[in-house]
Amino acid sequence: MDIFARSFGSPGYGKRRARQIDHHLARLASERDELIWTFRYWLEYSGDLRQYLWAHRNQDVERARKVLEILPPLTVSKILKYLVGSYWDRYCGWPDLLVYKEDDFFFAEVKSSSDKLSEAQKRWIKNNYEELHLPFKLVKIHKSRQASNESQRTASSD
C-alpha cells in the first residue's frame, strides 16, 4: 500500500481530499442501487485498505452491506463523510444496535444499570449531536425485582 493510501483516515487526508470526497459521495447518495453496486464493485479492489482500517473480516463486509440496504443513501453518505474526516478518531464508540422497521431506524446504545459509557461512546454521542444528527437512544437495562428473586432462589437451591 502506498503512502497516500496509508494516510487515509487521518484528519489531514479528509481535509486534502474534501472536494473529491464530496463529489464522489454526492454521486453515490442519489440512489440505493448505485450505492450497493459501487460497494460490490470496489469490494475486490479494497481489500488492502479494508485490512488497514480493520474492516476486512467477512462479518464486517456483511454488516456494511446490510447497513447499505437499511439506511437511506443520504444517511450513508453523511456517515462516510464523517468517518473519512478522521477515521481513527471516529470508528470506535458507535452504538450497539441499528434498530429498523421499513423506512424508520435509530441507533441504540444498550447499558446495564451498572455499566458506564466509554470515552469513545461519549465522543460518538457528542459528535452525533453536533454533526451527524442520527436518531439515537440510550437504553438502560435494569434487572427486574422478579428476575432478581428468581436468580436468588435458583442459587439457594443449588
Image (cartoon, grey):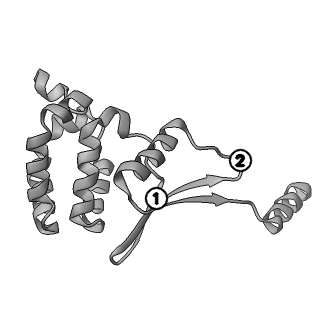
> Residue 101, image x and y in percent?
39, 76
Query: Could you say which quadrant of the image residue 62 lies in?
Result: bottom left
- Going by the numbered disc 2, the residue's amino acid type is Ser
Badge 2: few (under 14), some or many (20 or more) residues near its Cα, within 10 Å? few
Q: Tell me which residue sits at (46%, 58%) in the image.
A: 97
- Going by the numbered disc 1, the residue's amino acid type is Leu
> Residue 92, image x and y in percent?
41, 40
Residue marked by disc 1: 97
Among all residues in the image, which is located at the extreme top?
3
For marks 1 and 2 on the same chain, the one whose residue lies earlier in the sequence = 1
Residue 50 visible? The answer is yes
Helix or strand or loop: what does disc 2 sit on? loop
Residue marked by disc 2: 114
Quarter of the rendering occupied by the N terminus: top left
Badge 1: few (under 14), some or many (20 or more) residues near its Cα, within 10 Å? few
For this view, does 124 lie left or right of residue 58?
Answer: right
Q: Nearer the viewer, residue 19 or 99?
A: 19
